[in-house]
Amino acid sequence: MNTYQATQALLSERAVAQMLVEQEIAVEAEAILNSLAFTTDVQSFTAMAEQTDTDAEFERLVASLVQDAGRAAESVSVAVREDVHHVRFVSLPCCSRCALLAGRVYRYSDGFLRHPNCDCFMIPTTVASPLRQSPEDLAATGQVRGLSKADTAALAAGADMGRVVNVRAKSAGLKEAGRVLARAGRPTPEGIYRLAGTDRDEAVALLAQFGYIR
């Protein structure tokens, strides 16, 4: 499995660089990733695998760990580039919960609110990104699922989309994915972001100290 995690980390690092090139954003990385640092140690993986009862559960565990390695590598690849952030991009059509967050800009260290089966993704970019989506435009063009006729009429009349969606979805189920802050005594990238707070230089220094970049 470690091979898959390391490969996913490398792919994520390359994807960040490529997406910035496609946007004609010239920001050099201050360090390169150590892909092996994003793998799960044998002891931790064994403990997690012992909690699975079926082949399907085991396969979901492996897929989740590989995806986690890719997400962590992507966040680190953004962190080592000054003034680069993430913009939330929704796959259309989308639900009203995600439409409300479309185009929102996040720091590399911010949590990502999602619901079960959410297919939104984050694009590395600058704050002045041409990729930012407008929730109002998405609703006006019929790209938002789950809106009632009354909701649509209210929005067309100029109602605030945030109020319309939040009135209907106080228990929308959006939540930040569970954060693992340390494994085998070593902080994960997310744990490092928690330690560094808003100090990117400190975050980069800690990422180097714990072997995630070189």
Image (cartoon, grey):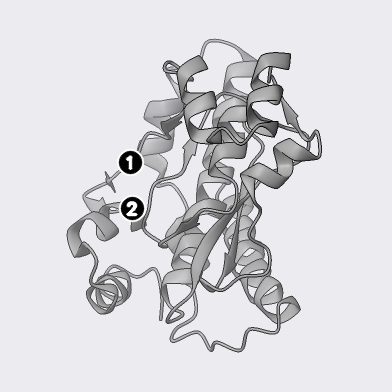
Q: What element does badge 2 sit on?
A: helix
Q: Residue 168 location, x and y as percent?
A: 51, 15
Drawn side of residue 62 relative to residue 110, left or right? right
Specify the quadrant that holds the C terminus: bottom left
Name the amino acid type tagged 2. Glu
Front residue of 110/154: it is: 154
Q: Position of residue 148 (x, y in %)?
A: 69, 15
Q: Is residue 127 above or below residue 162?
A: below
Q: Tell me which residue sits at (36%, 37%) in the image.
A: 44
Q: Position of residue 197 (x, y in %)?
A: 21, 62
Left or right, 160 with respect to 117, comes to left
Asked if labels 1 and 2 touch by Cβ distance under 8 angstroms, the answer is yes
Can you identify the residue that label 2 sits on? 190
Q: Position of residue 165 (x, y in %)?
A: 53, 25
Which residue position is annotated with label 1? 180
Q: Quadrant of the N terminus?
A: top right
Compared to residue 26, the image places residue 127 above or below, namely: above
Query: Which residue is nearer to you in this view: 188 or 59?
Result: 188
Amino acid at pointer 1: Val
Question: Residue at horizontal 25%, vertical 71%?
Answer: 206
Depth check: 35 or 72 in front? 72
Where is 7 relative to 20, above or below? above
Count every numbered label the image shows and give the total. 2
Q: Earlier in the sequence, mark 2 or mark 1?
A: 1
Separation of marks 2 and 1 at Cα, in angstroms: 7 Å
- The residue located at (60%, 47%) in the rendering is 102
Residue neighbourhood size for the residue with mark 2, other residues' Cα within 10 Å, grouped as few (<14), some (14–19), many (≥20): many
* Relative vertical location of residue 210 with respect to residue 149 in this rendering, above or below: below
Picture disc at residue 42:
none
The image quadrant of residue 152 is top right
